[in-house]
Image (cartoon, rainbow, N blue to C red):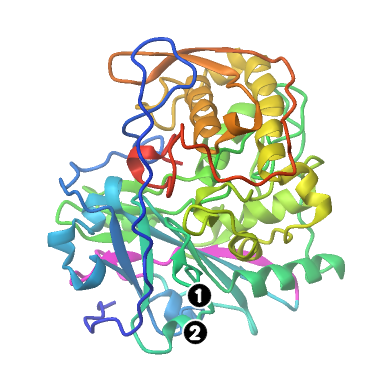
Amino acid sequence: MTSATAAPTATTTTDPTAKPTATAPTATATPAGSASATPCPSATATAPAPVTAANQNCDIIVPANPLSAAGLATPWQLTGPDGESPAASGCTEANSVNLGAFVQATILDPATGALSVYEPLVITQGTMPAAPPVVPALPAGAIVTIDVGFNGTNLTQVGATPDALQQGRCVNGLNGSIFGQVSFCNGRRFFRAAFRAEAEGRLVVPSAGISPKNGQACPTTRNFNLVDQDPSDNVTTDYLLTSTGGTAQDNAANTAALPGATGIVNGSDNKLLTAFIDPTLGCTPFQAPDLSQGGAPGTSQALDELSAAASQAAPVALIPENDEMVLVSNAFSAAKTNLYRSEIGQPAISAANNAADGPAVFCQNMVNIQTPFLSANQALLATDSSPVPAVGDNLLTFMANRLSMSFVNLGCQSYGLTNSVSVTLNAAGAATAATFSTVQQKATDPAASPSPSPTGPAGRRHWRRNNPSGM
């Protein structure tokens, strides 16, 4: 598949506001900060040496008709912002640890309710795929949603043609205030169709199940045991990267044909769930045939959200208004929050769900629910490897440090709450031990909606240096 070389014809204005970095302590501290967090690696993938670049923002060129079979098989192209070249900006897939982009599609057959997934390829603009992408066979009338993830700060969608973004019903944010790392295409329509198929009995989403390790319900992306300051962000897509900077879909055929290639991944809450938490707890994520991997079982962000919608008991963790991806000019925005929620199948803000997910109550639930979960499962979680060793030296210390930093970055201290986690950091700033206070807390003035506390990071958190977990 050849790459398009035409300049994009549509642009979106990025929000350059950056949040100051939380100071990282060098000994036992509450809360803990991390001056630099890297994206979540796979269990076996190794990343190439990153390109040194101050730039944190990139553009991604969306192909024409991105929801069609031909569009899905046409590579998306990563390039520099505002016309800057990939080389000058560092916006290359070879620099994936810092500025890599990843795309994931989930496909619904509206007639039968059958689901499948597909991983469209991202290449660096001006390069060729290391192997031609698989052209998926889509069912008649297929309804496709596309989720986009990024390991940098702001990734702006631009169209390869004047109509590409409209053809894909692509959403980058609200009126020039982009979400940042993530964007979507056709999510609202996909989830409406999927929920309708469930209601009519054509789609059956399996229960998330019970963990055989601790006897509790298996977590979902809407579980306060799992969430951080920006829930359900980024994707579970993996690519293969060659020594010359080419990329290919990660499947058996390409692995055999490209023996020197390494895996690259997107730091993701969804990857944390499906590749780390679920295996540790003996749980199985919701999977569907991956059309880019010959029909082998695959995961996706959309599948995780369908599972959460079907299985998550109250209180349900939805995108809160103090998630920095849904702030507008550092202020809460119900409209932007609802737009994000709609693209991942979550209900709009209401009095009912605000009782669990208003900014103050979200903080309260995160502290009161996740802290006892981590405390009670310390021995079990400590047996698994860390998704990001720079944050914690095993899964337990990673989760503890992630919770501690999420407390700061959500401004939870503004609501009369105290950080329930204390971590011990090594000389490199990674957590090596954690203690937990499981005393239940009550947020003050939960109906209020102030801006995040100026004592913690403010503005767009999703600068990598401020990302508490890279996920």
Dot 2 falls on a residue whose secondary structure is: helix
Residue pointed to by mark 1: 170
Within the image, what quadrant is residue 11 found in? bottom left
Please indicate, yes or no, whether residue 130 appears anywhere in the rendered image: yes
Percent x, y for residue 455? 46, 32
Look at the image and give the residue range highlighted in magenta.
Answer: 112-133
Tell me the quadrant of the picture where the N terminus can be found.
bottom left
Pick the residue in front: 196 or 400.
Answer: 400
Give the amino acid type for the residue marked by disc 1 in the picture: Cys
Q: CA distance from mark 1 to mark 2?
A: 6 Å
Does 393 sit above or below residue 311? above
Q: Whole-percent x and y of residue 99? A: 29, 53
Q: Does the magenta run of residues contain 279?
A: no
Element at label 1: strand
Instruction: Look at mark 2 in the image and give the residue it sits on.
Output: 166
Q: Amino acid at mark 2?
A: Gln
Q: Residue at x 16, y 68 (%)?
A: 85
Q: Residue reaching furthest bottom?
A: 162
Q: Residues within 10 Å of mark 2 (few under 14, many from 20)?
A: some
Query: Who's the residue at 35% across and 82% down the image?
Result: 10
